[in-house]
Image (tube, rainbow, N blue to C red):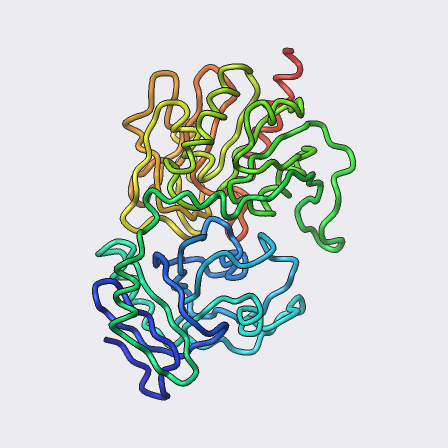
């Protein structure tokens, strides 16, 4: 049991195995239950909290300086925070950044997200690595009153992410067009005014910066809900189809998404590009399988090897499931592999411009080593139209 000895605890993190961490609460008050993961990124806490791929998860930040640059609406990856809660080592300080529009504490309170500081995040991270991502209950009470038995029971009763379809919870309610490009100094976000390609993006929990990358490589993007049918996709006469990132178990979301992907693959030869959950569901549609990982990959410093070029990329990742490369059928090859644990990070069809990666090449937060994948998708659409 870890306890903040300098002040009365106002927050409590209870693991399903009965381990209790006390700390200082900030943000919203109340209680939430989720899977606990850790993220090793040194920046981008706002993007992480608003990444739809974190639905059903509480994030432990291994980097201690969280809150130091405040928050700004420009950095939201979706309209509201999606991660269930935040765990940090130090209580957030006053922000010091010219772009800051608000303090992290007030932002979390206004957005209804619970956070706990004063935690030994190194010890907590070791526990996650050794035992797997635990189910936890996080409570914040300014008076410091906690029913520990009830919190542990709530953590143990939470069903977990396996078998859970969360894409339906974070997808858009209706279709929309996207033309905003990546942020650049000094104009900020410019608009795509001369698109070359029409792309339909399936929103399983799409990050705004992924859509911006598509727009920045010449795409006129139409975003459709996760439950869209193949007929609805093809009705837009796209030059390419994009499968977005998202949360939850790909096999659960795949009950409706995989048949849609298969129908598109069977009826057209359109280029297709998938990221994260989109990568996993493409693999399922092609005949592969996915597995739940011990603690997943979450961070902006993950080395991935391109098996076809030998190049090593430093990537941004956020996933708790992975494609089992041993189950890929003939005609589908593994293109990228994690140098941390050897897990699959990319696939492609050998005879068609259909490919996907497990990591987040839009780099928000993270390095920009992998932006070329968006350019590859654009070039595939160029070639497809030239050969049509």
Q: Position of residue 359 (x, y in %)?
A: 45, 42
Q: Nearer the viewer, residue 133 or 189?
A: 133
Q: Position of residue 133 (x, y in %)?
A: 29, 55
Quadrant for the N terminus, please: bottom left
Q: Position of residue 52 (x, y in %)?
A: 50, 50
Q: Residue at x 41, y 43 (%)?
A: 165
Q: Position of residue 190 (x, y in %)?
A: 74, 47
| Direction from residue 214 to residue 339 in the image, left or right | left
Q: Residue furthest right?
A: 193
| Direction from residue 78 to residue 151 in the image, left or right | left
Q: Residue at x 53, y 37 (%)?
A: 226
260 above or below 250?
A: above
Q: Quadrant of residue 56?
A: bottom left
Q: Nearer the viewer, residue 30 or 38?
A: 30
20 above or below 57?
A: below
Q: Residue at x 43, y 72 (%)?
A: 30
Q: Nearer the viewer, residue 360 or 204?
A: 204
Quadrant for the C terminus, please: top right
Q: Quadrant of residue 38?
A: bottom left
Q: Nearer the viewer, residue 126 or 199?
A: 199
Task: Please count the marks in the image.
Answer: 0
């Amino acid at each position: 049991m870890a306890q903040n000895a300098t002040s009365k605890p106002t927050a409590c993190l209870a693991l399903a195995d009965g381990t209790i961490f006390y700390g200082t609460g900030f943000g919203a008050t109340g209680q939430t239950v989720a899977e606990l993961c850790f993220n090793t990124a040194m920046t981008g806490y706002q993007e992480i909290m608003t990444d739809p791929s974190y639905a059903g998860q509480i994030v432990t930040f291994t980097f201690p300086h969280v809150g130091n640059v405040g928050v700004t609406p420009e950095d939201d990856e979706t309209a509201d925070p999606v991660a269930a809660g935040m765990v940090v080592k130090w209580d957030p300080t006053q922000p010091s950044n010219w772009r800051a529009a608000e303090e992290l504490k007030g932002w979390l309170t206004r957005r209804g997200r619970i956070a706990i500081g004063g935690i030994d995040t190194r010890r907590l991270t070791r526990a996650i690595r050794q035992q797997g991502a635990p189910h936890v209950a996080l409570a914040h009470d300014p008076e410091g009153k906690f029913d520990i038995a009830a919190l542990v029971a709530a953590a143990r009763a939470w069903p977990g992410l396996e078998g859970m379809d969360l894409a339906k919870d974070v997808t858009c309610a209706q279709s929309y067009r996207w033309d905003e490009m990546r942020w650049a100094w000094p104009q900020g976000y410019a608009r795509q005014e001369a698109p070359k390609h029409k792309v339909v993006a399936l929103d399983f929990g799409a990050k705004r910066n992924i859509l911006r990358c598509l727009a920045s490589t010449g795409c006129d993007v139409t975003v459709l809900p996760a439950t869209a049918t193949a007929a609805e996709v093809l009705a837009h006469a796209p030059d390419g189809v994009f499968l977005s990132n998202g949360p939850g178990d790909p096999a659960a979301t795949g009950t409706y998404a995989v048949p849609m992907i298969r129908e598109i693959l069977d009826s057209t030869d359109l280029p297709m590009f998938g990221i994260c959950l989109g990568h996993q569901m493409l693999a399922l549609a092609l005949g592969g399988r996915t597995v739940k990982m011990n603690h997943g990959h979450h961070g902006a410093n993950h080395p991935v090897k391109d098996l076809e070029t030998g190049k090593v990329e430093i990537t941004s990742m956020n996933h708790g499931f992975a494609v089992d490369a041993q189950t890929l059928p003939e005609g589908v090859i593994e293109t990228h592999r994690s140098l941390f644990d050897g897990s699959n990070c990319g696939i492609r069809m050998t005879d068609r411009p259909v490919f996907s990666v497990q990591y987040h090449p839009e780099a928000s937060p993270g390095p920009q080593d992998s932006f070329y994948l968006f350019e590859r998708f654009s070039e595939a659409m160029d070639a497809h139209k030239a050969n049509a």
